[in-house]
Amino acid sequence: MAHAATHDHHDEHHGAPSNFFTRWFMSTNHKDIGTLYLIFSLTAFFVGGSFAMVIRAELFKPGMQLVQPYFFNEMTTMHALVMIFGAIMPAFVGLGNWMIPLMIGAPDMALPRMNNLSFWILPFAFALMLSTLFMHGGGPAGGWTMYPPLSLQSDSLAYVVFAIHLMGISSIMGAINIIATILNMRAPGMDLLKMPVFVWSWLITAFLLIAVMPVLAGAVTMLLTDKYFGTSFFNAAGGGDPVLYQHVFWFFGHPEVYIMILPAFGIISEVIPTFSRKPIFGYKAMVFAIASIAFLSFIVWAHHMFAVGLPLGAEIFFMYATMLIAVPTGVKVFNWVSTMWGGSLTFETPMLFAIAFVILFTIGGFSGLMLALVPADFQYHDTYFVVAHFHYVLVTGAAFAIMSGTYYWLPKWCGHMYSEFWGKMHFWNSVVWVNVLFFPQHFLGLAGMPRRIPDYNVAFANFNMISSIGGFLFGASQLIFLGVIIHAVFFSKKKAPDRVWEGARGLEWTVPSPAPHHTFALPPVIHDDELAHGHVED
Amino acid sequence: MGQQQGAYFVPAKSQWPIVAAVVMFLTVFGAAHWLNAAPGEAGFGKTVITIGFIGILLMFFGWFRSVIHESLAGRYDAQVDRSFRMGMMWFIFSEVMFFAAFFGALFYTRMFSVPWLGGDGHGVLTHQFLWNDYTAAWGAGGGNGPGNIGGSFQTVVPWGLPLLNTLILLTSSVTVTIAHHALKSGHRGKILVFLGLTVLLGATFVYAQAHEYMEAYKELNLTLHSGVYGSTFFMLTGFHGLHVTLGTIMLAIIWLRVLKGHFSPEHHFGFEAVAWYWHFVDVVWLGLFMFVYIL
């Protein structure tokens, strides 16, 4: 059925892409828009990464080394905003754009023009946000969470707030599109419980996005009116409360954390079965675990605020609710390990990243569990322990999953194999240096080094130097990633077969590599043995 | 709900998305520049925001025109229709969550921050050391916080204009439903009358709301600066009023489209989407009337 599924004679409107401008700026094609998202994300990854290099360079030794404190604060703020909203989220949307229609047998996304708008808002939003770095008065420097009253002192607040509004509009439209695509565009026979786990994870993530991005918009709108229009939401003299901002922000912020990890779970749940040559262990448990994590994400937000002076009852509720999340997450880790158990494993680059994900994400999960304990959190709060924790879940979690997915699907996108040797070089360098970078930060945090400072006590010098060396080398390792991608797309001579990986199942492997501009113009016929995760018993 | 036989309508390449991104950027860039301009300084913010805003209007006109053309040309089958329905539904849900943020702020300040400032619960020390002469109260005489921000004010009496506005919006929900039933049974004259009535009721609501604002500012000294009471009052009712204004414009456009015969008894999602939106602003108003005006 491989080539029957492909439809390469189109009517006049849908012909092969014409000139550069029309193809890339006016696209309604999920693959081209997915590519745009991925290129944007990779660019943001290096921009945000360069900010991180500034941070690590300043922290290489105690004392003020290279930059002014205000600039350092701008770097920590912008590093977070660029990585979260520019690198991680668009990467997942790009992967979703490319793969969801291919995985469910749809001709395209449900709302293709809106899809293009979702993408094109992003470069403008980031131009608006990054431009503040060059403005009189500088960019935002109060941390990516923008807590008032500090954030209200910044001249750039309006630019950042409007940039966040734009990114929110983009995310909401992207999420609506993904929901409509998954619920309305599946090929006949692709029942909900036959969908690949990646598709499930995106469906659930999309609901999270629609529910919380508007809340973020509301929170930053209140900042805007407090600064420019004289409202008192966060002003105690007027009856408001700065802590109110933290509640509204983290009502968005905690689901946001899962927005950045659930699609990663989905990718890992595709890669591990392929290279274990077994269907995933506990398919339904995986789906239910993702859904439970998503539900719990709405009732744990105040664990980011334990040290702010919450009533005792709230501290206890949010502590236990947070620890509950370990249960479905444990189910997922157990199932990934069980999928590998007894499988015929091979260790190509995507699988290496996936295995590193399972181990290192679990470390990040455990430090998260430590942070969930109220009495312990009073010690860890706002220290480098927190920095170490969320970099383990975001770098070795989300970013490693994105890299795993990129190596996994790259041959399907460009039609050529990447260099396995350089892929493995990238992996081993990344996995070694990322631990040199972030593991010592646990010790720094436990010893009491606060986050978001440009200078520190000499007692913290050694671990900071080790961390900085790890940071520079981890940053340099990512240039290998860039090289591997450029080589595979433009120079690789090795053609990729339709089914790129021996153990791969699912509709995306039934279309040619590279996937033609239009696929599944007519819905494919689904055979159970083609399904990504085998036949699921009801 | 899988895909039916036949090809899904995938639109041709379109310039509208990139145009939309540009004009949205111009609007917010102009707005940010305007907000940051030094007092008395002209700057280019106003010019850019005006260009951006006009651009947004033109973009909507152009984008919807092409969609309406495709719809009239019969390019949309039942599956495309379902995608549109899902899109509108989840868009409205995102709007609900936007209002939820402001309702959350209202409940938090009323239930927690204002009583705490008055010495309740764990706010006892703040009260003792900073504002020990403050007695917590919502509304007049306390709702603007211990700093009496914005000066003493009076609240809007719910049983005057707000009650009238409630009746107006509820009536408009009935008229739009009558128009929908008329559309389904193909009585165009009846649609035009009842949809026209809905537009008029919407416009009346906006007018009454503007009148109420002027009265609040002039007679009651209730302004956006009136502490957190004024903040929540004007932000909630203001965003709602903005949504009613948009909804009224949308209804008016639908009225014109009915006049041009764009809808059939079976195929009129444009009408339904706007009707859904209208019911949404109606429900938000009921929440406002209850929690902002009465309680």
Image: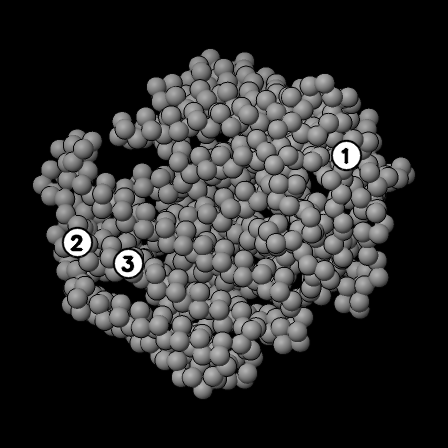
* Residue in the foreground of this view, choosing between B289 and A308: B289
- The amino acid type found where label 2 is placed reads Gly
Structural distance between the alpha carbons of marks 1 and 2:
64 Å
At x 34%, y 19%, the residue is: A375
Q: Is residue A419 visible?
A: yes
Residue pointed to by mark 3: B288
Outermost residue, front side: A538
The chain identifier of the residue carrying mark 2 reads: B
Residue pointed to by mark 1: A504
The reply to whether the C-beta atoms of the residues labelled 1 and 2 are less than 8 Å apart is no
Q: Residue B178's x, y, as percent?
A: 40, 76
SS for callout 3: helix
Q: Are marks 3 and 2 on the same chain?
A: yes
* Vertical order, A72 against A437 (above or below): below
- The amino acid type found where label 3 is placed reads Leu
At x 76%, y 27%, the residue is: A277
Label annotation for residue B139: 2
